[in-house]
């Protein structure tokens, strides 16, 4: 029973990871913002971060896609963050398959210059980390889910054994009577069958 529970929870966790949850393939790129005027490049990076997640940016991307997405959908699929106190922007695209994630990132990077130019930011950029198509999902991880399932099965089995042992009130020894009824044991009847076998009669 102990082993069966562990096997079942392990299999269930693997199936949940492999087929029950939406896959997340994340493609990452990093760009370095440079200022073309007297304004600080770090401030320009902050401005560009807001600009690159604006509805106008997403409208620009939608013009080149066969199927358009809403602003809310883009907010889930594209994240732009400024590395604290630097000119570096980290961009991540998150889709349910690797090819779509990589394609969206490429399209996004292609249209950054157009958006910067349209809004007269007097800034330029260079890619310091080129995107690569993800080979496996960032979530869920099949191995982690399988190990967690096995661990959970072990814990459930262990707790079950302890509970059954604690609830078992079967009398198996002299001490059980003393503990259960709080009385002294005055005597013990011998096991005649064993005595006969022992004496060979």
Image: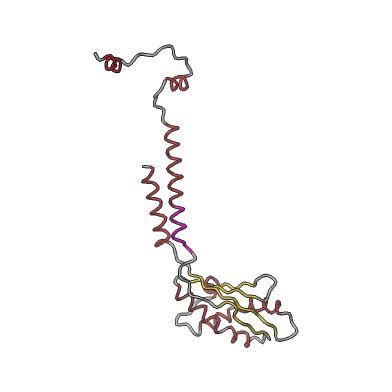
Q: Is residue 56 left or right of residue 155?
A: right
Indicate whether 199 appears above or below 138.
Answer: above
- Residue 81 position, x and y percent, is 62, 72
Write the residue at 46% across / 61% down: 141
Indicate whether 143 appears above or below 6.
Answer: below
- Give the main secondary structure, helix, strand or loop, of the magenta stretch: helix
Write the residue at 32% across / 16% down: 191
- Residue 43 position, x and y percent, is 71, 77
Q: Is residue 188 left or right of residue 79?
A: left
Query: Residue reaching furthest right?
Result: 38
Position of the C terminus, as image quadrant, is top left
Q: In the rendered structure, which segment of residues is drawn in magenta?
A: 139-148
80 part of magenta stretch: no
Q: Is residue 77 left or right of residue 117?
A: left
- Residue 180 position, x and y percent, is 46, 22
Indicate whether 44 appears above or below 26.
Answer: below
Question: What colouring method underlies this structural image?
Answer: secondary structure
Which of the 4 image quarters holds residue 47? bottom right
Disc count in the image? Answer: 0
140 part of magenta stretch: yes
Position of the N terminus, as image quadrant, is top left
- Residue 187 position, x and y percent, is 41, 12
Query: Residue reaching furthest left?
Result: 201
Write the residue at 37% across / 50% down: 8
């Amino acid at each position: 029973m102990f082993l069966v529970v562990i096997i079942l929870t392990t299999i269930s966790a693997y199936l949940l990871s492999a087929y029950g949850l939406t896959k997340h393939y994340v493609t990452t790129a990093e760009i370095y913002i440079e200022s073309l005027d007297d304004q600080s490049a770090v401030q320009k990076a902050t401005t560009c971060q807001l600009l690159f997640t604006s509805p106008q940016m997403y409208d620009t991307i939608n013009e080149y896609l066969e199927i358009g997405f809403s602003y809310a959908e883009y907010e889930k699929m594209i994240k732009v963050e400024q590395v604290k106190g630097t000119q570096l922007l980290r961009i991540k695209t998150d889709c349910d398959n690797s090819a779509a994630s990589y394609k969206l990132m490429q399209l996004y990077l292609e249209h950054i210059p157009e958006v910067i130019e349209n809004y007269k930011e007097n800034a330029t950029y260079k890619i310091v980390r080129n995107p690569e198509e993800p080979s496996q999902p960032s979530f869920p991880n099949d191995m982690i889910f399988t190990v967690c399932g096995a661990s959970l099965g072990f814990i459930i089995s262990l707790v079950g054994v302890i509970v059954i042992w604690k609830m078992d009130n079967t009398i198996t020894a002299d001490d059980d009577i003393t503990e259960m009824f709080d009385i002294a044991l005055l005597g013990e009847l011998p096991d005649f069958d064993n005595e006969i076998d022992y004496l060979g009669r």
